[in-house]
Amino acid sequence: MPNAIASPEILAFAAGFPLALLHAAATLAILVAGAALYATLTPHREIALIREGNSAAAISFSGVLVGLALPLAAAMTASASLLEIIMWGAPTIVVQLLVFRLVDLLLKGLPERIQHGEISAASLLAGAKLASAVVLAAAVAG
């Protein structure tokens, strides 16, 4: 009976799993850094607003997290190395940060509207983030 531990599947998993964990950890680190950068650059403090029960801030920040994660996931899928993940991941973060500014130009006073709990403004921002994330993810995945 062949040794199950020495099977090609188990050996491939044993060789690939640490690399998969490294890529996932790096991608999650980029996601956290991007979310922290977003939270720092926006004039309102979404985490504090969320802690106070502001639903608009929660919708907005949720859109940010998913909007950042989608292109990062595509970058991780399309990349063969950690360097490629970083090279594709960093620009997608920058583009997603610019989407906030574009929606702010469109809506005039977006930070104040979110601070005041305006769900419609937060929903539009979340939708814009998700739409641009899907396009970015497709572009990165090629």
Image (cartoon, grey):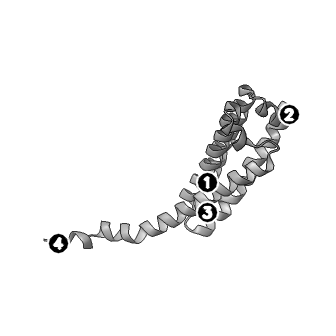
Residue depicted at x 70% and y 53% = 36
In the rendered structure, the answer to whether residue 104 lies left or right of residue 52 reads right
Q: Residue furthest front?
A: 52
Q: Which residue is mark 2?
A: 109
Q: Are marks 3 and 4 in contact (CB under 8 Å)?
A: no
Real-space Cα separation, disc 4 to disc 2, in angstroms: 68 Å
Front: mark 4 or 2: 2
Q: Which residue is mark 4?
A: 2
Front: mark 2 or 3: 2
Q: Position of residue 131 (x, y in %)?
A: 67, 38
Q: Earlier in the sequence, mark 1 or mark 3?
A: 1
- The part of the image, by quadrant, that contains residue 75 is bottom right
Q: Position of residue 23 (x, y in %)?
A: 54, 64
Mark 2 closeness class: few <14, some 14–19, many ≥20 residues within 10 Å: few
Disc 1 residue type (three-letter)? Leu
Disc 3 residue type (three-letter)? Ile
As drawn, the label of residue 85 is 3
Real-space Cα separation, disc 1 to disc 3, in angstroms: 8 Å
Q: Are marks 2 and 1 in contact (CB under 8 Å)?
A: no
